[in-house]
């Protein structure tokens, strides 16, 4: 029954959005709503930069938000720890005054591995060299799949390895 109720709730929410209710507000800039928030989570890829360079408007908006007392966190699902994400942003000459901190799924996963939450024997599939930062200080042993406590997969292009077609 819960499954059905959830679908009904989802449908009601979707209908309210289509009707133009006040549940969602489309804004033209962060400045229009920034006084309502203490913090902003800004996605990195596509919102803060395009893979080559930071978006000037995003940098300016976050800097202005911070000047007014807000906290700006860059958020990414990159499989790398925050320090590696910072290096990538620095290589793009990103203005570090635009954010207070960086949070990455790779950082959260790396912390979990470092803490031994899943064991210390790791089978790893990934790009040699590119994924090294994930394992820095983790104290893990890379082993065969049969001997592993944990399998980690870092692949940004799974088609290269034939994982998906």
Image (cartoon, grey):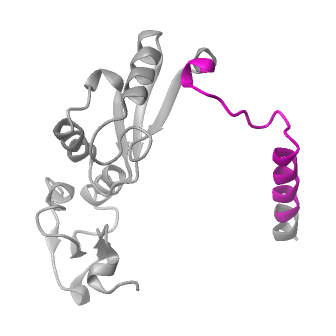
Q: In the rendered view of the protein, which quadrant contains the N terminus?
A: bottom right
Residue 161 to residue 108: above or below: below
Residue 141 to residue 108: above or below: below
Determine whether, in the image, residue 76 is placed left or right of residue 161: right
Residue 3 to residue 35: above or below: below
Numbered-mark total:
0
Span of residues in magenta: 7-33
Q: Nearer the viewer, residue 44 or 102?
A: 44
Determine whether, in the image, residue 126 is placed left or right of residue 102: left
Residue 105 to residue 41: above or below: below
Q: Residue at left 37%, top 41%?
A: 103
Q: Nearer the viewer, residue 99 or 57?
A: 57
Q: Quadrant of residue 85?
A: top left
Q: Quadrant of residue 2?
A: bottom right
Q: In the rendered view of the protein, which quadrant contains the C terminus?
A: bottom left
Q: Residue at left 22%, top 75%?
A: 124
- Taking the magenta stretch, the answer to whether it contains residue 152 is no
Where in the figure is residue 132, as x and y percent of width and height?
14, 60
Residue furthest left as drawn: 129
Q: Residue at left 30%, top 76%?
A: 151
Residue furthest bottom as drawn: 146
Where in the figure is residue 137, as x and y percent of width and height?
14, 53
Where in the figure is residue 16, as x and y percent of width and height?
87, 46
Where in the figure is residue 105, as x and y percent of width and height?
38, 53
Q: Residue at left 43%, top 15%?
A: 64
Q: Nearer the viewer, residue 84 or 44?
A: 44
- Taking the magenta stretch, the answer to whether it contains residue 23 is yes
Determine whether, in the image, residue 54 is placed left or right of residue 27: left
């Amino acid at each position: 029954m819960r499954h059905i109720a959830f679908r009904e709730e989802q449908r009601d929410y979707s209908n309210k959005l289509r009707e133009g209710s006040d549940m969602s507000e489309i804004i033209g800039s962060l400045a229009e709503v920034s006084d309502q928030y203490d913090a902003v989570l800004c996605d990195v890829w596509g919102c803060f930069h395009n893979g080559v360079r930071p978006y000037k408007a995003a940098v300016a908006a976050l800097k202005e938000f911070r000047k007014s007392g807000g906290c700006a966190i860059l958020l990414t699902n990159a499989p790398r720890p925050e320090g590696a994400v910072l290096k990538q942003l620095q290589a793009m000459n990103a203005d570090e005054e635009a954010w207070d901190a960086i949070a990455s799924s790779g950082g959260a996963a790396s912390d979990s591995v470092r803490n031994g939450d899943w064991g210390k024997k790791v089978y790893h599939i990934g790009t040699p060299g590119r994924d090294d930062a994930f394992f820095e200080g983790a104290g893990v042993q890379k082993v065969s799949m049969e001997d592993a406590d944990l399998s980690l997969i870092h692949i940004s292009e799974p088609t290269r390895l034939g994982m998906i077609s």
